[in-house]
Image (spheres, rainbow, N blue to C red):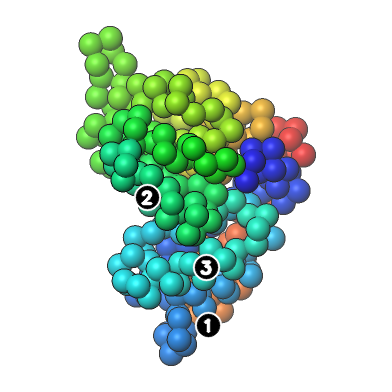
């Protein structure tokens, strides 16, 4: 998907919500466990219930890989089921020597036809460039993450006082344009979102951390906004497990609508719609 199309979808859906498909066998409703593919049945119901209120879906690959071949099959069926106007993100956090990264890119962009894949930048330029060779596909680089462990490395300073995540932003933004590269910036780091925005004003951010992790949507919009919105805000558990009963899809829909309506207010306040 192109950047222009993504922005158009944000405007027409009045939403910059990304629904995270962290589909956990231990949490999906009991009545689905008797079906042939509980993970896919769950995802299908969630997609049907939320597709009018979000612009993106982000399956986290860990929840599928742990089930072996069956999990990959559920993931493939899920990605094929998601409507084509939705931006799809493989949250896989890959990155390896160039020769190996080429095959990760093949998996997620050819076999699976995702729009984007998340990448850990630790191995540098050759670990990222194979993904950038695909037209209209995206790389989403981990910059300032939402977890506690972000403090272990990301805030380390070099001799000039520059933090590691700042360095990552400056370097990687030379490798890929704002038409093909985005950054992961955690909603739990409102103090840092502004500094990331200052370094990469035009790039989109994928923002996890609202809902279950307690980050604020309004702070994210206040510090991370750019002229094109520039934000895809993810919620996984907060939507998927709004109910663990037979009404899970309608409760997920209610949650998605709640977030979408807050987003609509922000989009109007900022003058994008
Ligand atoms: O910094 C990061 C990077 C990725 N994630 C992922 O996003 C979702 C968040 O799930 P919630 O249930 O909405 O908390 C999950 O897949 C994480 O692995 C992140 O949280 N923070």
**Residue 103 has which mark?**
2
Q: Mark 3–mark 1 contact, CB under 8 Å? A: no
Residue at the spot 46% in from the left edge and 22% down from the top edge: 174
**Of the residues tagged 3 and 1, which is closer to the observer?**
3
Residue carrying label 1: 246
Q: Position of residue 204 (x, y in %)?
A: 55, 35
Q: Mark 3: give few (<14), some (14-19) or many (20+) Cα within 10 Å.
A: many
Secondary structure of the residue carrying numbered label 2: helix
Q: Quadrant of the C terminus?
A: top right
Residue at the spot 30% in from the left edge and 67% down from the top edge: 66
Residue carrying label 3: 78
Q: Residue furthest bottom?
A: 34
Residue 235 in sight from this viewpoint: no
Mark 3 or mark 1, earlier in chain: 3
Q: Mark 3–mark 2 contact, CB under 8 Å? A: no
State whether residue 100 is above or below residue 229: below
């Amino acid at each position: 998907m192109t950047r222009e199309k993504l922005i158009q979808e944000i405007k027409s859906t009045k939403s910059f919500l990304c629904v995270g498909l962290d589909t956990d066998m231990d949490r999906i409703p009991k009545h689905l466990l008797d079906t042939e593919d509980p993970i896919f049945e769950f995802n299908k119901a969630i997609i049907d219930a939320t597709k009018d209120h979000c612009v993106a879906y982000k399956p986290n690959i860990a929840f599928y890989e742990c089930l072996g071949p069956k999990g990959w099959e559920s993931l493939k069926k899920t990605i094929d089921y998601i409507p084509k106007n939705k931006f799809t993100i493989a949250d896989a956090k890959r990155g390896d020597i160039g020769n190996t990264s080429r095959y990760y890119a093949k998996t997620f962009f050819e076999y699976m036809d995702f729009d984007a894949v998340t990448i850990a930048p630790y191995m540098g330029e050759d670990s990222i460039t194979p993904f950038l060779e695909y037209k209209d596909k995206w790389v989403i680089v981990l910059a300032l993450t939402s977890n506690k462990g972000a403090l272990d490395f990301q805030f380390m300073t070099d001799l000039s006082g520059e933090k590691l995540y700042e360095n990552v932003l400056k370097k990687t933004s030379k490798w890929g344009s704002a038409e093909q590269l985005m950054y992961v910036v955690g909603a739990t780091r409102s103090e840092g979102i502004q500094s990331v925005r200052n370094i990469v004003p035009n790039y989109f951010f994928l923002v996890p951390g609202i809902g279950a992790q307690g980050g604020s949507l309004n702070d994210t919009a206040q510090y991370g906004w750019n002229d094109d919105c520039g934000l895809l805000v993810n919620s996984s558990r907060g939507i998927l497990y709004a109910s663990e009963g037979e009404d899970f899809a309608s409760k997920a829909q209610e949650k998605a609508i709640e977030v979408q309506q807050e987003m609509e207010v922000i989009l109007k306040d900022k003058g994008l719609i």
